[in-house]
Image (spheres, rainbow, N blue to C red):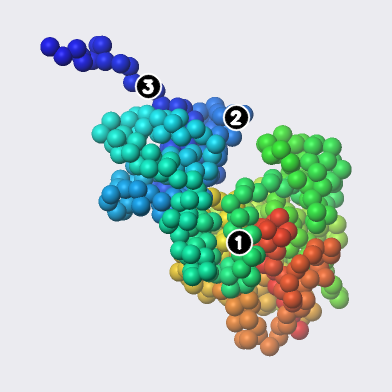
Amino acid sequence: MSDRTPRNRAPQRRPDKVRQVAYRVIRQVNGEDGYANLALNKALRDQRLSGRDAAFCTELVHGTLRWQGAYDAFLARSVSRPLADLDPELLDLLRLGAHQLLRMRVDSYAAVNEMVTLTRAEVGQSRSGLVNAVLRKISQRTLDQWIATVAPKPDEDPGGYLAIAKAHPRWVVEAFAEVLDAESVEDLLDADNEPPKVTLVARPGLSDLDELVEAGATRARWSPYAAILQGGGDPGRIQAVATGRAGVQDEGSQLVAAALASAPLDGSDAKWLDLCAGPGGKSALLAALANQREAVLTAVEPQKHRAELVRSNLRAIPGDHQVLIGDGTKPTWPSGWYDRVLADVPCSGLGALRRRPEARWRRTPEDVEGLRPLQEALLASAITSVRPGGVVAYVTCSPHPGETRAVVDAVLARRPDAVLEDARALLPGVPSLGDGPDVQLWPHVHGTDAMYLALIRRT
Ligand SMILES: C[S@@+](CC[C@H](N)C(=O)[O-])C[C@H]1O[C@@H](n2cnc3c(N)ncnc32)[C@H](O)[C@@H]1O
């Protein structure tokens, strides 16, 4: 009689909790269209992971999601059937294993064993053999060796090479190459693969940099309102942030909002409009600046829950600022009503890829095309909303030329009553702003999101 009865079978190892949490977050992102940051924060809270465990879990989730396009190319060489035929759960387990083997300093033996144990627990014993075999193959080469094996030669197909070597979709690499030289494209892709530092904004008139520095942050380089929380950590522990006198805001976002506020203006300067306001980071900075000049900000946002976020961002700012739930392309105010208008239009977000690890794999060239009519309509509406002599800032968090210059050029071609002005002088001290008249900020140059700004004056 066999002695492999349930009673005397060796007890199965439990999966490592941190890897299990990371795997489940990745499944929420890839399987249910979740957002990595939201899903991860919730999981860390629910599972009470903190300190080193939270940092390890974050690297597992963010790193796997960022690099998954490259890992898929390596896995495709290591699995005997097409990846598309694998269960999505299995594919995510393999990606998570590949990340530990190729980009983390996890010992190969431990990484494979832990992933086999996790596979058993999550999808069953029958799949653990495949995970073991495939991850052993992955562990036989370093990341550089895998890139050399799988990617096209850089001189023959630079876009194809970078797509694998820097883990970005080819169309994104090619869009960046339209506006940057080859070396800069590579630097940008590297910058996209590093998590950004937490940047705070001291809302003028309510807080200042001294207060943030006292709370442990260090002054940032360009924005007079920006400070960086070097070690990361929860910004909410800082009193000024908890009370809304300061906030969390990328330095590039601060610079473009401040640029609109500082554009020279003759005559009235009392009415400011934020045409696409949710969630309200720029609204809060603009409202604080407006308040110092006795101007008032109106913020427009069509989505109710995002309008609510704008309200909450404006709560601490003194003044009669207003939030309207509405469509910015269908103004309910008279033409020429405002003195300054921000059109921070919905865009592909290709300028903020370092913030959202999964975003690069979700976007498509069709998204960029699809957003174009709305972007043009919003810019046209912004120009109509501003008085003669007033200024509009057209802003995107994308450097894709189809969302930046192409939109501005198309709208201005139809608007003889508007001219493009040089925006560079409105970002004093900020280097490498390009040939103008518009401004493009870059993660690899400025350490900001890739914010685009065009300043337009109604004549
Ligand atoms: C890039 S985000 C704005 C970010 C915001 N300025 C900030 O700093 O927090 C674009 C916003 O435009 C909103 N939006 C979409 N369609 C719109 C429309 N037709 N009119 C006005 N806003 C719109 C989106 O809901 C989104 O909240």
Identify the residue under disc 2.
52
Q: Looking at the image, can residue 341 be seen?
A: yes
Mark 3 closeness class: few <14, some 14–19, many ≥20 residues within 10 Å: few
Residue 251, picture quadrant? bottom right
Q: Secondary structure at mark 1?
A: helix
Q: Is residue 291 left or right of residue 108?
A: right
Residue type beneath disc 3? Arg
Residue type beneath disc 2? Arg
Residue 178, picture quadrant? bottom right
Q: Position of residue 336 (x, y in %)?
A: 72, 77
CB under 8 Å between callouts 1 and 2?
Answer: no
Q: Position of residue 247 (x, y in %)?
A: 72, 46
Give the mark nearer the N terminus: 3 vs 2. Answer: 3
Identify the residue under disc 1.
186
Mark 2 closeness class: few <14, some 14–19, many ≥20 residues within 10 Å: few
Q: Residue at 45% of width from left, 51% of height from top?
A: 146
Q: Position of residue 63 (x, y in %)?
A: 53, 45
Identify the residue under disc 3.
13
- Among all residues in the image, which is located at the extreme left? 1
Q: Looking at the image, can residue 236 be seen?
A: no
Give whichever of 453, 95 is nearer the camera: 95
From the Cβ of disc 2, is ligand 1 less than 8 Å away?
no
Distance Cα–Cα, label 1 vs label 2: 31 Å
Mark 1 closeness class: few <14, some 14–19, many ≥20 residues within 10 Å: some
Residue type beneath disc 1? Glu
Q: Secondary structure at mark 3?
A: loop
Distance Cα–Cα, label 3 vs label 2: 22 Å
| Quarter of the figure that contains the N terminus | top left
Distance Cα–Cα, label 1 vs label 3: 43 Å
Give the mark nearer the N terminus: 1 vs 3. Answer: 3
